Image (cartoon, rainbow, N blue to C red):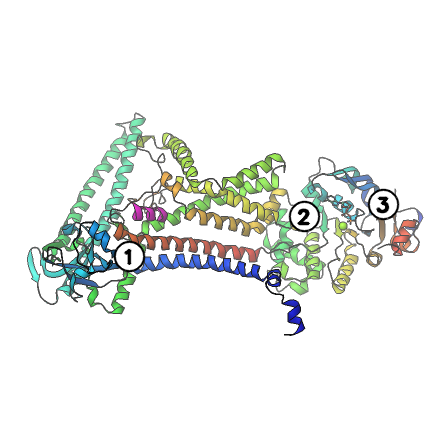
Amino acid sequence: MSYPLQQTVTAEAPETPCIETSKLSAYYKSKQALHDVSITIPENKVTAFIGPSGCGKSTLLRSFNRLNDLVDGFRLDGNISIHGQNIYSPDVYVPELRSRVGMVFQKPNPFPASIVDNIAYGLRLKGIRKSTMIHEMVEWALRSVYLWDEVKDRLNDNALSLSGGQQQRLIIARAIVMQPKVLLLDEPASALDPIATFKLEQLIQNLKDQYTVVIVTHNMQQAGRVSDYTAFMYMGKLIEYDLTATLFTNPKERLTEDYITGAYG
Amino acid sequence: MSATTNKYNLGLKSWFHSGLPWIWLNAAAVSASLILVIGLLLLIAVRGLGHFWPKDVYEISHQQPDNRVYRVIGERIRTEPVGIQRLLDAGMQIDAGDRSQIERSLIKTGNRDITGLDFRWILDINILSENTPADITVLERKEWGAFYGYIKEIREANTIINSGATQYGLLNEKLAEVHQLLSQAKSIEKDKIGKLNYELERLRLKQRKLELKNKAGTASNTDIQQRQQALESQYQIYFQQLQELNNAAARTTVIMEAMGGERVEISLANIVRAYQPNDMSVFGKLIFYLAKLWEFVSEDPREANTEGGIFPAIFGTIIMVLLMSVVVTPFGVVAAVYLYEYANQGVLTRLIRVAVNNLAGVPSIVYGVFGLGFFVYTLGGGIDQLFYPENLPAPTFGTPGLIWASLTLALLTVPVVIVSTEEGLSRVPSAIREGAFALGATKAETIWKTILPISSPAIMTGLILAIARAAGEVAPLMLVGVVKLAPSLPLDGNFPYLHLDRKFMHLGFHIYDVGFQSPNVEAARPLVYATALLLVLIIIVLNLTAIYIRNNLREKYKVHDN
Ligand SMILES: Nc1ncnc2c1ncn2[C@@H]1O[C@H](COP(=O)(O)OP(=O)(O)O)[C@@H](O)[C@H]1O
Ligand SMILES: [Mg+2]
């Protein structure tokens, strides 16, 4: 196993790999955004990607649910497998893959519909029509993100009437109601105020019991607070990847050290 | 003067640089446009709506050059100055002193059956006296236009039933009775006999179909003949009833004295309404006005469209616009979705987009020609060959009609819908698209469940523009289905209820027909304005409805604009 670099990991129970990439290179038209990235992300842990803006964190993250396929001129070399399945192999049905790999974006993006309909969106895509079943699952999802008590009296209100933090939790509920294995979060707190951020971080901590969480953040404190493992990226390359505690206290690479000590912005 | 004013108030140049003149110019341009639009609406409103107000009827004595005195009864339409020289040149002998202009009045005298014309000019200097006697009665007739004169006798079956002071009241009583009979007759004629005729025609076509298949003489054919006979005998019964009613209605007549002293007998069945405008109170006039207005929007036209109402034209306009909307929306949306979401954004797509944009600039008559050539003759002709061979050589769909007019207008307006739908699609935030994809939606699901609803306000905007253009379009319609007088509405109680093959009337064409094709231009002029006003109102109502729907959709599908 090409696991987080060597030794320290063994202190904990051995990890099962969830997402594995090998020699991953990504291009937007002729511009290369990722260079030979090989990383193994463990199951039921929170893994954070940090690095300066434009270093390829989102590109890597969005390769895990093939959302980059939508971008004109995007091309990928190398391999990504999730639970051992090569997700870029031709026999993968992409919508089904995406329903297994949930994603939450930088800014909350609720559909212009009611709270219930937002969460039921994916269920209905799956062909679930029974309203009692939908309601049960909606309630479960909302409870999982601690939103139920705040919205249970106005489930049919437009989702846009919620606050930013509530909306972001709604988006997470919308993702986890599909019962995915993996949850990808791309700077989920960057549009939120400190209190909403705090609630979100708590939520992420609890999610890892059931999901493999990958979170992109440019906020190092946040990475330190929520993640078990941290990967530092720079100019499309994976520079260092280790237990969060190790990476922050004892970085091996000079670049990492400069970045986490704030040598550049 | 303080230092500040000196510094900042350097006269014209600084005023110019301050941008104020620009603001004033903008404001002036906006005001000018507003004034023009409001003025236009006001003009047609006043001219058109004034027509229905009952005007005083004058009895005028005036002297002709031969020194004889004539009596004229009629409404004064307008008074205008006219140059003496022009009148002298026209061979008139007038003694106007040293004036170079005198006034003349246009009098609507009606009584076209007697005098041959509805209107005449009278020079004001020739008028000896004029007054407005209370007992002048105006009869609005189904034929020959209005009649102005005095009631002399009322007869029923050739016996005088009344003469004296209460004639006017009695006339109206009798009129109500006659109208009662006539409406019974009409209901028999339109509903019962109409249905019979329709059935008979269907049977005839069935028979013809059997003949075409060489099956004449079979059981079903004799069956048809029996049905025909039953219908024929039923027809005879109705026809009898109809005649009796018509005869009863025609029994009552009124003897009127016209302005020349002639006595004229007029059947009450020919009178729409009788009134004495000089004797009306303002309130009475108001009631009369509203009744006339209602008649205008709810009745069929009479007298080569110069009298009566314009209901069929209103109906035709609206139903055509609605049909067009039903066709153009899905078409435009599907085309736009393909162009924006699916087509390769290459040179070809860009070329198509340019072509679509330019289609909106093609003169509408060209669409009319295309509609006639392609829809009516090719498509309609083909449909007739395939589905209505029993009717040939009489065409069913191979002739201008409602469906072809709607399709032609849909074609005319589809570019607008495509352009604004594409605009709407492009404004859906990519975050929303990605949100749908990330939940496992396919492209089609994303488009149908998420993108199209969010774009629906833009689609409605396209439809609004399409309606505005289509409702005012006349030129192509003349080629593909509009007629000056349609025998029946495209919607009725006979299967299939909406008759897409029928010809129909349209307000825009009606304006043209009444205003410029009418034998009686003076009488038609106010109707041109009234019809124009109505056309504008209908377009406004259609648009407001669409805008209301759009605003609701906007509210419903509002998204974060990130
Ligand atoms: N849709 C795109 N088209 C072209 N280039 C892109 C696109 N998305 C990202 N890039 C480029 O790829 C590089 C990595 O971007 P990204 O993965 O978004 O970085 P990060 O999320 O770390 O800020 C950047 O240089 C960016 O300019
Ligand atoms: Mg990013």
- Mark 2 is surrounded, within 10 Å at the Cα level, by few (under 14), some (14 to 19) or many (20 or more) other residues, namely many
Identify the disc placed on residue A263: none
Identify the disc placed on residue A238: 3
Please tell me whether mark 1 sits on a helix, a strand or a loop: helix
The chain under label 3 reads A
Identify the disc placed on residue B434: 2
Gap between marks 1 and 2, in whole Å?
Answer: 58 Å
Asked if badges 3 and 2 are on one and the same chain, I answer: no
Left or right of A25? Residue B5 is: left
The amino acid marked with disc number 1 is: Glu
Image: magenta residue range = B503-516
The amino acid marked with disc number 3 is: Leu
Determine whether A226 is above or below A18 in the image: below
Quarter-of-image position of residue A64: top right
The label nearer to you, 1 versus 2, is: 1
The chain under label 1 reads B
The residue positioned farthest toward the front in the image shown: B98
- Does B510 lie within the magenta span? yes
Q: Residue at x 69, y 61 (%)?
A: A164
- Mark 1 is surrounded, within 10 Å at the Cα level, by few (under 14), some (14 to 19) or many (20 or more) other residues, namely some
